[in-house]
Image (cartoon, rainbow, N blue to C red):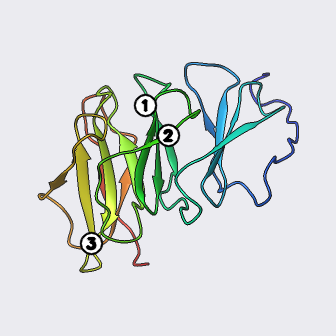
Amino acid sequence: VDGGKTWTSIAYPGNGGFAGVLLADPAKIGRVFAPDYGHTIYRSANFGATFAHNTIGGDSDYFTASPSIVIDPVTPTTLYAGLNSGVWKSVNSGATWTKTALAVPSGGPNAIAVQKGATATLFAAVPGDTGADMLEKSTDGGKTWKAVTSPLPSQQFSLIAAPASPRASPRLVPSPAR
């Protein structure tokens, strides 16, 4: 509220802990999203004074991507979440979730990103059978996915979702082996 001059502790509403991410909605001041270590997204519309929550997937689902949730920069009511069962999408600020068509070989995506300036274009880095990550791309909001085959590093990588220009795709950077 005051540009970070003062801070207030907020009580975590869940049983575990936040998964290291607190995501602010760029279109609505005061709305924040916080995933837990399982498959629950906590939402606050009042700077964290109170939280509502929604679970994504089933009891065996859990967040795998880092960041585990991303907001579409053009349509901020659209969010994506990376779980072991795949990429999930919400079009109502996290109130309800639908699984996208991404086929996950094993373990779920380890990174997800929305292309800046292209609301329906998203990327998911998923583990491949050989241990190297594969990059999947959707240009229709997750309805269909295609493998990006080149140029890709032959090692594990992370998605960096802060492109240098509005038209640029997320960048790939090498990451240490898991």
N-term-proximal mark, 2 vs 1: 1
Looking at the picture, tell me which residue is in the foreground, 5 or 123: 123
Give the residue displayed 53% in from the left and 62% down from the top.
61
Marks 2 and 1, how far apart at CA: 15 Å
Q: Quadrant of the C terminus?
A: bottom left
- Under mark 2, the amino acid is Trp
Question: Three-letter amino acid code at disc 1?
Answer: Asp
Question: Can you tell which of label 3 and label 2 is closer to the viewer?
Answer: 2
Residue 26 numbered mark, or none: none
Q: Secondary structure at mark 3?
A: loop
Distance of label 3 from label 2 (alpha carbons): 25 Å
Q: Residue 121: horizontal and vertical position, in percent?
A: 27, 36
Name which of mark 3 and mark 2 comes first in the sequence: 2
Query: Is mark 3 in CB contact (under 8 Å) with mark 2?
Result: no
Above or below: residue 176 compared with residue 1: below
Callout 2 secondary element = loop
- Label 2 sits on residue: 97
Residue at left offset 58%, top offset 28%: 25
Disc 1 target residue:
72
Q: Residues within 10 Å of mark 3 (few under 14, many from 20)?
A: some
Image quarter hosting the N terminus? top right
Query: What is the number of the mark on residue 128?
Result: 3
**What SS does tag 1 mark?**
loop
Mark 3 belongs to which amino acid? Gly
- Which residue of the protein is positioned furthest toward the left in this rendering? 150
Can residue 59 be seen at all in this image of the molecule? yes
Q: Nearer the viewer, residue 9 or 34?
A: 34
